[in-house]
Amino acid sequence: MKREFVSPEDINLKAKHLSTPLDIRRMEWQANYFASSPLLPRLQFSRGFKRQLEKFALLNKGFGALFVDYQPVNVDTYHFITNALKFEFGVSKSVVRYRLIDLGLLNDVRERKRSRIEKIFLHHE
């Protein structure tokens, strides 16, 4: 895949080798998740993440090391930190995101709401 995401226009549902957009999303998630561990070793990545938190003077206020919801300030902070890590480690933003989640460093409450919506949507496909 050339991009970090697959849009509906990229998928030809009539092609016999593709089952559903859900299959494409699963493959994309697996690839990004698999890449996150060897490309972002726990110790080095954690140190880089800590440096970014210090750079932005972010404190864990009980919601997680990096908290993001729909508030613009939290969304901006999330993008600043993930972009910095993306460039520092030479990986995609998706890979950074999966590693943050895997290490328990990201609390994205937007994802919980999105997951519920996707479950409803995917159930009706």
Image (tube, helix red, strand yellow):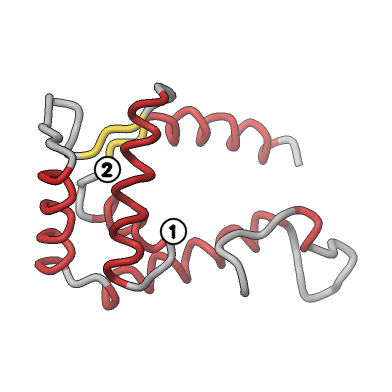
x and y, in percent, of residue 86 in the image: 35, 62
Number of marks in the image? 2
Q: Which residue is drawn at 74% across and 35% down?
A: 124
Q: Where is residue 104 in the image (x, y as percent from the top left)?
A: 21, 47
Q: Is residue 90 left or right of residue 100?
A: right
Give the side of residue 113 with respect to residue 101, left or right: right
Answer with the quarter of the image where residue 119 lies. Answer: top right
Secondary element type, mark 1: helix
Mark 2 Cα shell of 10 Å, populated few (<14), some (14-19), many (≥20):
some
**Label 1 neighbour load within 10 Å: few <14, some 14-19, many 20+:** many
Point out which mark residue 48 bears. none
User: Which kind of residue does numbered mark 2 sit on?
Assistant: Leu
Q: Which of 84 and 29 is in front in this view?
A: 84
Q: Is residue 104 left or right of residue 29?
A: left
Which amino acid, by three-letter code, is at mark 1? Ser
The residue that mark 1 highlights is 94
**Mark 2: secondary structure:** strand
Q: Residue 1, percent across and down?
A: 62, 74
Alpha carbon distance from label 2 to label 1: 13 Å
Task: Kindly identify which numbered label has been placed on residue 106.
Answer: 2
- Give the left or right position of residue 69, taking residue 12 as reference: left
Residue 38, placed above or below residue 36: below
Q: Which residue lies furthest to the top in this view?
A: 71
Counting residues from the start of the chain, the first of labels 2 and 1 encountered is: 1
**Picture coordinates of residue 53, whole percent (x, y):** 15, 44
Q: Residue at x 10, y 60 (%)?
A: 47
| Image vertical order of residue 79 relative to residue 23, above or below | above
**Quadrant holding the C terminus:** top right
Q: Badges 2 and 1: C-beta atoms under 8 Å apart? A: no
User: Who's the residue at 12% across and 36% down the image?
Assistant: 57
Q: Quadrant of residue 71?
A: top left
Q: Which residue is drawn at 12% across and 53% down?
A: 51
